[in-house]
Each structure stands twice: as C-alpha cells, then as structure tokens.
Image (cartoon, rainbow, N blue to C red):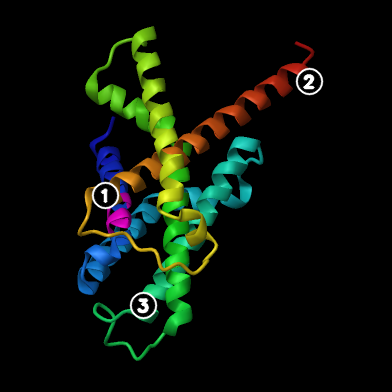
Amino acid sequence: MSPFFMIRLVLDFTAAGLLLAALAYWWLDNTSHELIGTGMFILLLSHNVFNRRWWARLPKAARGRPNLLTNASNISIALAISALLVTSVLISRSVFAFLPLNGGPTAREIHILAAYWAFVLAAVHLGLHWSMIMAVIVGLLRVGAPNAIRTASLRAATGAIAAWGIHSLFVMGIGDRLIARPSIDFWDFQESTIGFFLHHIAILGTCACAAHYAAVSLRWAGGVKQRTDAGV
C-alpha cells in the first residue's frame, strides 16, 4: 500500500471529521465554525484533485447498477458541497466578511439544508467504499484469516450501531433538517456535548451500513442475472 494513498485516506477522514465538527454550530463560536468549514473545503478540493481522473471518465462510465449508485452518490455530494460552499461565502461574518455580500435568511436556510445533506451523503459515500477501507484496515492491523467468532462479533456490533443510529435520526430530527422543515429544537451542549457527536456518528454508521449493503445487494442481483442470462 503506497504512503500517498494512506495520506489521501487520512485527509478524507479528516474532512469528514471537520464536517461533523462544523455541524455543532451552537457549541462553537462563529469564527471557529467558519475556520473549520474553510479547512474542510480545502481538504475536499484536494480530494477532488486527486480523483480528477474519475470525473474525466464519468461521461464514459459503465452503467451497471453498482456504478450507477456510486455515480449518483458522488454527483449528489458534489452538488451538496457546492451549495454549502456558495452559501458559506454569502453568509460569512468572519473569513469572507470582506466581500460585499449578504445572503440573508434564505441563504442560511439553504446552508443548513446543504450541510445535513452533505453529512448524509458523505456517510453513503463512505459505505460505498467500505470494502476498500476495511481491506486497508485489515492490512494495517495484519488481521489473520476470517473466523466465525470475529465475523459474528462484527455483525453484532454493526447491528447495534445501526439500531442506535435509527434512534438517533429521530433524536436529532434529521428528517426535518433534510426537508428544511423549521425547527426550534437545538441540542443542549451544556447538558451533553459528547452525546451530540455520538448520535451523529451513529447516524453516519447507519447510513454507511445501508449504502454498503445496498451496493452488495445490487452486485449480487447483477451476478444472478448474468448467470441466468448465461443459462447457469
């Protein structure tokens, strides 16, 4: 495994961590929020520079079901991040305050909407690349051949995270935020800060898990269809 690839992976996870931190707006002051967001955008720009060949191949990409899911995910997250970036500049009161812009309340609403969609789509993106990530982790930890006990333990842990993530979706009101429904419910960081992040990490895990198994199902269905068409 090349060191360059590992650096890219670390930068990608750092960008995801910054996105999660930026969601805790009421825990941060505005300047910190904008600086965290700026750092995230710089990392995401580098991510797309590293993956520029993927974008160049997109018009000629194969139209198989798994590829379609990945392509739709990547395009969707790119649109969400673009909306997040534009509205960030429009409503900035610190980093881009020197610009003569004023986005107003509409830009703020779009900014919040784009932020939560970016978070969910980032989780989906993670899930679609989960097999590759696990292969990297297995290689780094030098994990031996699969065994039934470890497999059962990991699946049980995945099920527990997914269950907690579904619960967290309702606790954090993610559904309302994804459709821009007005809400006056804000997390009380004085009562619990770690709870905010644990709920969002669980949501990330649930969405990643759903995306991973959706891709696996599509690959399985595609394999069955090919065998059927071949008369096997």
Q: Can the viewer see residue 111?
A: yes
> Identity of the amino acid at label 1?
Thr
* Residues at marks 3 and 2, CA–CA distance in whole angstroms: 53 Å
Residue 173 point in image, percent of width and height: 45, 55
- The part of the image, by quadrant, that contains residue 10 is top left
Q: Main secondary structure of the magenta part?
A: helix
Residue 152 point in image, percent of width and height: 40, 14
Q: Nearer the viewer, residue 111 or 12?
A: 111
Q: Nearer the viewer, mark 1 or mark 2?
A: 1
Residue 70 point in image, percent of width and height: 54, 43
- Answer above or below: position of 142 versus 33: above
Precedes in sequence: disc 3 or disc 2: 3
Q: Is residue 222 found left or right of 125 in the rendered image? A: right
Q: Which label is found at residue 14?
A: 1
Q: Which residues are magenta?
A: 16-21
Q: Tell me which residue sits at (35%, 48%) in the image.
A: 200
Q: Which label is found at residue 89?
A: 3
- The answer to if 19 sits in the magenta stretch is yes
- Answer above or below: position of 29 versus 91: above
Q: Tell me which residue sits at (36%, 80%) in the image.
A: 91
* Residues at marks 1 and 3, CA–CA distance in whole angstroms: 22 Å
Tell me if mark 2 has few (under 14), some (14-19) or many (20+) residues whose alpha carbon lies within 10 angstroms of its own.
Answer: few
